[in-house]
Image: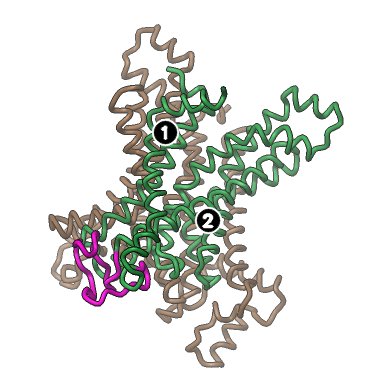
Amino acid sequence: MRFRDSWETFRRSRVGPIGLMILLVFVLMAVSGPIYVYIRGEEIYHPLKGVDPVIKGVSPPSIRHPLGTDHLGRDLLAQLMYGAQTSFLIGITAAAMAVFIGTSVGLTAGYFGGAIDNLLMRIVDIMMVLPGLPLIIITAAAIGKQSIWIIVFLIAILGWAGTARVIRSQTLSLRERPFVEAARVAGASDTRIIFKHIAPNVLPLTTLYLTLGIPGVIITEAAISFLGLGDPSKVSWGMMLQWAFTTGNTYNPYWLFPPGLCITLMALAFYLIGRGMEEIINPRLREI
Amino acid sequence: MSLATYIIKRTIQIAITLFVVITILFFLFRVMPGDPTAFLLDPKMSPEAKEIIRKQFGLDKPLYVQYVLYVRNVLKGDFGTSFYYGVPVFERIKELLPNTLLLWVPAILLSYFIGINVGRRIAWKRGSKEEYIMIVLGLFFLGMPIFWFGMIMIWLFYHELGIFPAGGMMTPELWLDPSTPLWKKVADIVYHLLLPIITLSIGGFAGSMLLMRNSMLDTLREDYITTARAKGLKESVIRDKHAARNAMLPIVTAMSISLAFSAGGGVLTETIFSWPGLGREIVQAVLNYDYPLAQAAFFYISVIVLFANLVADVLYAYLDPRIKY
């Protein structure tokens, strides 16, 4: 029972299950956002278009609005719940794209070696030292349009290098293992060896890098939205903080604290899960 | 590989990266669909002035000639005229660059100092409650958006406690008054600098702390640590002289990645604290559609990051005896 062993290790890591629990809360939050808005009435509680006929501007938490309202009288709780959706959407898709590119590059470089490896790794070196956030800011300016898919794409394009480096070194060692040798002697093609024999073995590492990549994406997206370069049609936590900042409401704790705490805790949840997974994948960490 | 060859090799690599940066800028603003003149020419300019600039940037010439011209102009520091300020872009950059360095350099050094020291400490106390708390706290800080942390700092230290200014770099009245002595002016800048530096360094220490811990745990497993113990050396000597010194190497290697990351933190911190530096300017320029200024700000931020990388490389070469035979 391999799965049960892994789960046992994960559980004993202490931090892993805590991460899972935090994540579960956010999943519930994301799912219940639309339900909350539906039950309480679309016209007033819609996170972007909601208009409260009674409360026109900023208001502290009340029974009517459990977390208060923003400068346009919109419900902060609804925004917070929809923000969880945006973070999941962007975090998972961008990290998945980045890890996919990184794994492909790492497998190619590690398996073929030589000039290809050299070229790809020099590209990785360059990608690693480019200042990511400023580059995203300036690219977003040059493109002009603001949509979450452009943001996802930019984050992924700039974020694959770390994974590529790790997968490459793993591939380098896998390439020399007897089972790969056996496959080669049996006449398997390069593609077959890569996909059938090497790729499945780097998959755990890829999953780990996916998990550890998501927080970075979530923070980057928050920063982009905070700077006013986000997608205006989707509420995100970074955008809530931007609204608070640009309308001079940073001194209202009920507006300042929840979005930032959500970003931090969601990122933390993925880091904790990642650490739990690390103990399964890298047994060396378990000793001592 | 001798020390000199190593550093020359790294310098060449960094120079290549700088060309990549210039090329990215060129492609972003010339080749992207749309009219490249929109990125270069202020819509408010007269047709004659537009014609002059068009000639200067060679927009009437083939693309590769444009590229050569662009590289030449960038290397000369000529990014054209700012749309927003109406002055040569370089004039702006000259004012902002020192301010950025004033904030970023101490903050990054401080964050490494804290990170390395705490990381060393908790690795030494493997399995203790302190280690567990610091790891979770470290991951919390790692996941925390720095601009939010900055906003909390302003809320707490300016709005609630009133000890620090909300932002900016100097008190205008103090600087406009000709009778103010120099030391007061300097003290005024330091006073404005403290909160942003604390924000940037606390916001960034977690990465180096966790890395230092891992690296330290690796070195603690080495034979020479056992040897040192067997020799009966003092625990603090083993920790600081034998283990920590060697554990530093991966930290310096990882610096290049975290420096690129710190630049993002720097941009956000400057924005939050209205610090008149390159990071705040790149955001402002983008929001003002001031493309020449935005390109220049990005270029100089990249130069800072790449130069810091070079420093990290030299440091690595200095720390690692294997490079010096």
Q: Quadrant of the C terminus of chain A?
A: top left
> Where B323 falls versus A38 (above or below)?
above
Residue B253 visible in the current orientation: yes
The residue sitting at 41% across, 20% down in the picture is B242
Tell me the shade of chain A: green
In the picture shown, does residue B135 fall above or below B274?
above
Q: Earlier in the sequence, mark 2 or mark 1?
A: 1
Chain bearing tag 2 is A
Residue B109 visible in this rendered orientation of the protein: no
Amino acid bearing label 2: Ile
Instruction: Name the residue carrying label 1.
Output: A16
Task: Name the residue that disc number 2 marks.
Answer: A155
Residue drawn 43% across the image and 11% down it: B226
What is chain B's hue in the picture? brown
Cα separation between marks 2 and 1: 26 Å
Mark 2 surroundings within 10 Å by alpha-carbon count, few (fewer than 14), some (14 through 19), many (20 or more): many
Q: Is residue B117 left or right of residue A66?
A: right
Q: Position of residue A127 (x, y in %)?
A: 58, 51
The type of residue carrying mark 1 is Gly
- Position of residue B54 in the picture relative to residue B227 (left or right): right
Is residue A85 covered in magenta? no
What residue span does the magenta drawing correspond to?
A: A46-75
Q: Nearer the viewer, mark 2 or mark 1?
A: 1
